[in-house]
Amino acid sequence: MTMSDITPPHGGTLKDLRVEPERAEELRAEAVKLPSWDLNPRQVCDAELLLNGGFSPLEGFLTEADYAAVCADMRLADGSLWPIPVNLDVTREFAGSLSAGDRIALRHPEGMVLAVMTVEDIYRPDLRREANQVYGTTDEAHPEVFRLFHQTGPVYLGGRLDGLELPPHHTFKNLRHTPRELREWFTKMGWNSVVAFQTRNPMHRAHVELAKRASQKGEANLLIHPVVGMTKPGDVDYFVRVRCYQEVVRHFPEQTTALSLLPLAMRMGGPREAVWHAIIRKNYGCSRFIVGRDHAGPGKDSNGTDFYGPYDAQDLVARFQEELEIAMQPFEEMVYVEDLAQYVPRSEVPEGGRVLNISGTELRRRLREGLEVPEWFSYPEVIARLRQAFPTKREQGFTVFFTGLSGSGKSTIANVLVAKLMEIGTRPVTLLDGDLVRKHLSSELGFSKEHREINIKRIGYVASEITKNRGVAICAPIAPYAATRREVREMIGQYGGFIEVHVATPLEVCEERDRKGLYAKARAGLIKQFTGIDDPYEAPENPEVVVDTSQYSADELAQQIVLHLERQGFIDLA
Ligand code: PPS
């Protein structure tokens, strides 16, 4: 017997796919002998909502017939409304080892088996068609389209799941609830009507006003239900957001408001996603669902145009209102009117009223530069939490990335710079010199293009970890290829400063110095693929600093870099 088909007071039938404990034990024993698929983070999120009933009425990953119907018509093959494909994508090799009817174990990255799947269908999706039908575009600026085209396995497996256990959570356990737990809690509290507020961003005063008004309007209790599974790349991480929500929830009446975290992997699918979110909230026992401006919007396409209209999501949810069994609470954007000193829906701004706004980008700038964020915009406690996540340049880590020919003087300047930064002493400093890295991290690599790229990416990865943890990394490889340097810049730039220093000593000078005697050997053909001789060096086009070793000493050049760091605000020499 499974625990499915429970019909509690709110939200209709819940398909909880977890089996009874005795059966789970039998399945665990069976799973040891089954082929095993290691779920990726996104699949773990999908599996959790399948197993706990958040994705009711689904009973597993979509079969081919369901998938085709969902993509084309937003329905399962049996006609039930379901707008977003939920697939198990796998590699060609894994799929090739299976036949329909086989059973496989689905494993969490920590090793435990979450479910046993009976494979009904093994099929190759047309990912371009999926992108077009579901997201209305094949533009890779759409994060889900990018994921489909670059990170999705080529074969989908469809089939029912027997759930053994939910994925473990090690954070904010008191804020995590299954649909069944929330439904029971609402019943216990006597909350007959609950309106859900979806968010993937920190909440500021505008969101609080909106959620309060929406719950008053719907005469409902409020569930703040933020997504903590996967959201849009670049979003504020959920650890920080949850600390902000915990601050914000204190500004709501305690007896009518709850906070619970939703482990959903969003698709940023705009209108279709809004319908999906409504179904999920119904499953979690809510009776109303707030759909605001640009719900689950992915931002702008590669031509700078919004993928979806601001109220497309509301229109689509309204179209299915009858079938949804959860009422939409449409809501306009709330804006702050200075003359009134209050928030109002945009359409209610009095004529001539001055509307104040701070965009997400502007907020990040103010946080990074340590500038004031006004109280009309957010609560000081929330801003304090965000400031921890957006350190100012003085608090951020940074990487100084030297690049230049062999013998150009990179290591000599890098060593002096390390000493000067240690003397300043505000951050720990790590030197990742070319030779050091090749000894300790890349000893098996040679100098082919492929090996050089791996070498530089390793340096980039270590430097990005150091930068993330607010230290200083000084790197000094040749790093001859522009594309690899750009990748490293992106890797590090998301966490802190990246200062590329081109040590522009001309080849003739390096060759004349030839301290290691390598140029002579390269000319003699004894060393192959030597940078500058028979392997290219692509000079940086826009480095932050260019140093000229023919005119200045290493000490003077290192000091130039120190001054650059001060001008940029990373260090304080005063
Ligand atoms: S790369 O291209 O960035 O991966 O190179 P890097 O790790 O900095 O290693 C460069 C040092 O290795 C020695 N060496 C060579 N350099 C360039 N080309 C070839 N084929 C080669 N073979 C050995 C050389 O001593 C470089 O050291 P530096 O300190 O740059 O002179």
Image (spheres, rainbow, N blue to C red):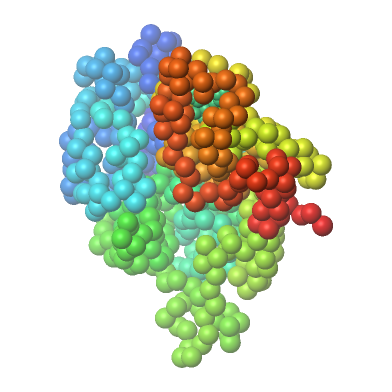
Front residue (pair 303, 299): 303
Residue in front for this viewpoint, 224 or 23:
224
Q: Can residue 295 be seen by looking at this rendering? A: yes
Answer above or below: position of 568 versus 50: below
Q: Is residue 4 left or right of residue 255?
A: left
Residue drawn 51% across and 78% down? 344
Residue at 30 percent of width and 30 percent of height: 153
Quarter holding the C terminus? bottom right
Q: Position of residue 61 (x, y in %)?
A: 30, 32
Q: Find residue 496 and report its horizontal and vertical position in percent.
A: 61, 47
**Compared with residue 99, is residue 205 higher up or lower down, i.e. above or below?**
below
Outermost top residue: 33
Give the total number of marks visible in the rendering: 0
The part of the image, by quadrant, that contains residue 548 is: top right
Please provide percent x and percent y for residue 362.
Answer: 55, 65
Quadrant (top left, top right, bottom left, bottom right) of the N terminus: top left
- Quadrant for residue 363, please give it: bottom right
Which of 319/480 is in front? 480
Tell which of 429 and 363 is nearer to you.
Answer: 429
Q: Is residue 347 left or right of residue 158?
A: right
- Residue that extends furthest to the bottom in the rendered view of this protein: 351
Any part of residue 180 in sight: no
Residue at the location (42% across, 51% down)?
281
At a point 61% along the width and 82% down the height, the residue shown is: 341
Q: Position of residue 44 (x, y in %)?
A: 43, 32
- In this rendering, the answer to whether 321 lies above or below 184 is below
